[in-house]
Image: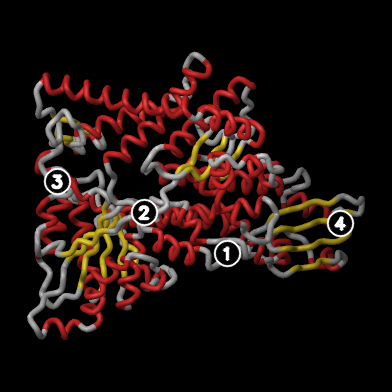
């Protein structure tokens, strides 16, 4: 309505201006030289007229004195009849040259037709425009309940198959029978097998849930409908359920096909946990999804694939057999899968001969497929900024640190005292990690600021790990507390640098006692129940299932474990102080130490530690 009033006001102003211009044009046509017919007769009788031009209703009179006069006559009356009616003899007119011009259609249009037609046309235009606006609003209202589903086959996207999906070997085997069912449903139906109605893909963000769903559709060569769970829910009650009905109606027309609902937890959260009651719009949408999945005919080849990284909050009715029959778990890739993923993302990038993707895979444990794609993209951007034609191995390794910690902050200038504190802090982390059993090996040490960190010690496991032992937890706590211990011993006081380390240790020690049951003083059980308040988003409420006395024991045990880890770090620092000072000296000189050079210092090979600076170190 606001746009309608605005457009109407614009048209009204335009009409007003046009009428004003036309009125001004007409007024300029009326000059002081206009005379009456009887005056014209007087000029003729006095023989003052040199010649006369007749143009429609206008009579232009050119006098012998050089003046020009204009008279008006009726359109249907000729000039000779007019003069005869005024008693002008033919002999008098014969002596005056009279030129009669043909009627000008333009003059007739501007003087007679346009003043009447222009307001009428503008009025009709306004009525037509307003009608179109009302029809458009009505059509939008009629389509408000339709789903905004996108058919990937009509979007011009590249066809994705299992060859484009690296890793996920078990997941691809799990969904392969779905592809076969879509290709040859009669083979299964003849044996009484029913098509799986729903597949739930569970995994952390970036593990390739959407990519795998597109690959299923590409392998089966069927339409692929993509929609997000949040697109169902609107502010108006019933819209979400209407869109669900429209989505499944479109899918049945295109069967066999696949419906992919991304982030289904937006509408599939457990019912009854919120404040909206049974009439909540989200719950009505979920109810409609449940009804549609139950209403599938046995011969309808429509499969619903949903993705979520929060399966714990989904409604039990959504997960029962007959709805989401299959659950496919996608984890972060291991080292072999990371190598395959890197090869796919590096296919269209010019890599230098020194690039070893296997080494990159070793340096990226815990990276998802999306993280690896972002890693190579950052390396390509960095190489382009350096005006290189190829991506070097160092570009990729630097991009790992950028993805993990953020970009280098070379503009942050530390004082000499702060550089010494940072060097001892990072060197202590590395030294304790080197001499602590079960600790991850140190890959790099740097006192160059990245992100919010003043420096960093990069530790990466040599192999993928799925379980962690008690010894590994204690080693990690000792490594994290080494920065605090060395600052207190070397400088006599502690700065704010170890604050993040203390938070990490406190969180790890509490989990060590309350979740993993690794405390020797307490029973091997879990203490506390963590519950998510669904209607409050991510807020976690921990409900105590133990007494105050047990809580005191938990606090004492956490403090004891942290204290023992702290003592372990201090003992190692005192015992290997010479190595610590050697690492600090090299750090202050080069700012960065790679793994080979660090191992050389730890093993007493000072000639390698004192080697000339590399080109990369000098550039940093």
| Kind of element beneath mark 2 | loop
Would you name the residue on which mark 2 appears? 464
Q: Nearer the viewer, residue 390 or 194?
A: 390
Q: Is residue 535 visible?
A: no
Near-viewer residue (328 or 255): 328
Front disc: 2 or 3: 2
The structure residue drawn at horizontal position 34% and vertical position 64%, both measured from the top left corner, is: 150
Real-space Cα distance between discs 4 and 1?
93 Å
Q: Please, what secondary structure does the residue beneath circle 3 have? A: loop
Left or right: residue 518 versus residue 365 is left
Question: Would you call the spot at circle 1 few (<14 residues within 10 Å), some (14-19), or many (20 or more)?
Answer: some
Categorize mark 4 by other alpha carbons within 10 Å: few (<14), some (14-19), many (20+). many
> To which residue does mark 3 refer?
270
Q: Give the mark nearest the N terminus, 2 or 4.
A: 4
Q: Please tell me which residue lies in front, 549 or 488.
A: 488
Give the distance between the C-alpha atoms of the residues marked 2 and 4, in whole angstroms. 115 Å
Q: For residue 49, which numbered disc appears in the image?
A: 4
Task: Look at the numbered disc 4 and give the secondary structure of its residue.
Answer: strand
Q: Quadrant of residue 153?
A: bottom left
Query: Earlier along the polypeptide chain: callout 3 or callout 4?
Result: 4
Residue 349: assigned label: 1
**Could you tell whether 462 is left or right of 536 in the image?**
right
**Residue drawn where x is 55% and y is 51% of the image:** 397
Residue 85: image x %, image y %?
Answer: 69, 61
């Amino acid at each position: 309505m606001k746009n309608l009033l605005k457009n109407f006001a614009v048209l009204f102003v335009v009409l007003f201006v046009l009428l004003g211009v036309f009125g001004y044009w007409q007024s300029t046509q009326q000059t002081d030289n206009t005379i009456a017919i009887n005056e014209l007769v007087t000029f003729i009788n006095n023989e003052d007229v040199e010649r006369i031009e007749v143009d429609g209703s206008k009579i232009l009179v050119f006098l012998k004195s050089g003046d020009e006069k204009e008279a008006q006559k009726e359109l249907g009356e000729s000039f000779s009849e007019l003069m005869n009616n005024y008693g002008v003899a033919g002999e008098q007119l014969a002596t005056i040259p009279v030129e009669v011009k043909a009627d000008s259609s333009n003059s007739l249009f501007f003087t007679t037709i346009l003043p009447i037609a222009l307001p009428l046309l503008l009025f009709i235009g306004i009525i037509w425009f307003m009608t179109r606006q009302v029809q458009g609003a009505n059509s939008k209202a009629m389509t408000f309940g339709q789903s905004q589903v996108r058919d990937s086959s009509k979007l011009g996207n590249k066809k994705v198959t299992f060859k484009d999906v690296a890793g996920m070997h078990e997941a691809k085997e799990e969904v392969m029978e779905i592809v076969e069912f879509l290709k040859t449903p009669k083979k299964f139906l003849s044996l009484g097998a029913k098509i799986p109605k729903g597949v739930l893909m569970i995994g952390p963000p970036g593990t390739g849930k959407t990519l795998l769903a597109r690959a299923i559709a590409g392998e089966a060569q069927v339409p692929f409908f993509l929609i997000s769970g949040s697109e169902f829910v609107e502010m108006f009650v019933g819209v979400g359920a209407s869109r669900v009905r429209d989505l499944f109606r479109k899918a049945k027309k295109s069967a066999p096909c696949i419906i992919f609902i991304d982030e289904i937890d937006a509408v599939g959260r457990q019912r009854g946990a919120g404040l909206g009651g049974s009439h909540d719009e989200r719950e009505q949408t979920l109810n409609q999804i449940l009804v549609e999945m139950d209403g599938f005919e046995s011969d309808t080849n429509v499969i619903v694939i949903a993705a979520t990284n929060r399966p714990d909050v989904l409604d039990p009715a959504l997960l029962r057999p007959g709805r989401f029959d299959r659950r496919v778990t996608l984890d972060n890739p291991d080292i072999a899968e990371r190598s395959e993923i890197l090869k796919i993302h590096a296919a269209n990038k010019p890599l230098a001969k020194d690039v070893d993707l296997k080494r990159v895979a070793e340096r990226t444990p815990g990276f998802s497929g999306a993280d690896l794609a972002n890693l190579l993209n950052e390396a390509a951007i960095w190489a382009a900024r350096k005006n290189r034609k190829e991506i070097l191995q160092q570009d990729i390794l630097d991009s790992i640190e950028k993805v993990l910690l953020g970009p280098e902050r070379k503009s942050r200038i530390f004082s000499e005292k702060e550089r010494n504190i940072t060097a001892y802090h990072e060197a202590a982390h590395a030294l304790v990690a080197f001499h602590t059993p079960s600790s991850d090996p140190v890959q790099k040490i740097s006192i160059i600021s990245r992100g919010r960190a003043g420096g960093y010690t990069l530790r990466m496991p040599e192999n993928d790990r799925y379980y962690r032992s008690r010894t590994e937890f204690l080693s990690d706590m000792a490594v994290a507390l080494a920065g605090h211990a060395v600052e207190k011993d070397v400088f006599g006081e502690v700065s704010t640098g170890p604050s993040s380390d203390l938070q990490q240790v406190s969180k790890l020690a509490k989990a060590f006692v309350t979740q993993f049951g690794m405390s020797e003083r307490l029973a091997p059980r879990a203490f506390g129940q963590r519950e998510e308040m669904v209607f409050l988003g991510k807020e976690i409420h921990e409900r105590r299932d133990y007494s105050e006395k047990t809580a005191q024991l938990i606090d004492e045990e956490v403090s004891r474990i942290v204290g023992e880890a702290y003592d372990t770090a201090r003992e190692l620092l005192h015992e290997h102080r010479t190595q610590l000072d050697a690492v600090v000296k090299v750090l202050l000189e080069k700012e960065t130490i790679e793994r080979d050079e660090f191992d050389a210092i730890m093993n007493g090979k000072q000639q390698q530690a004192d080697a000339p600076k590399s080109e990369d170190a000098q550039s940093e």
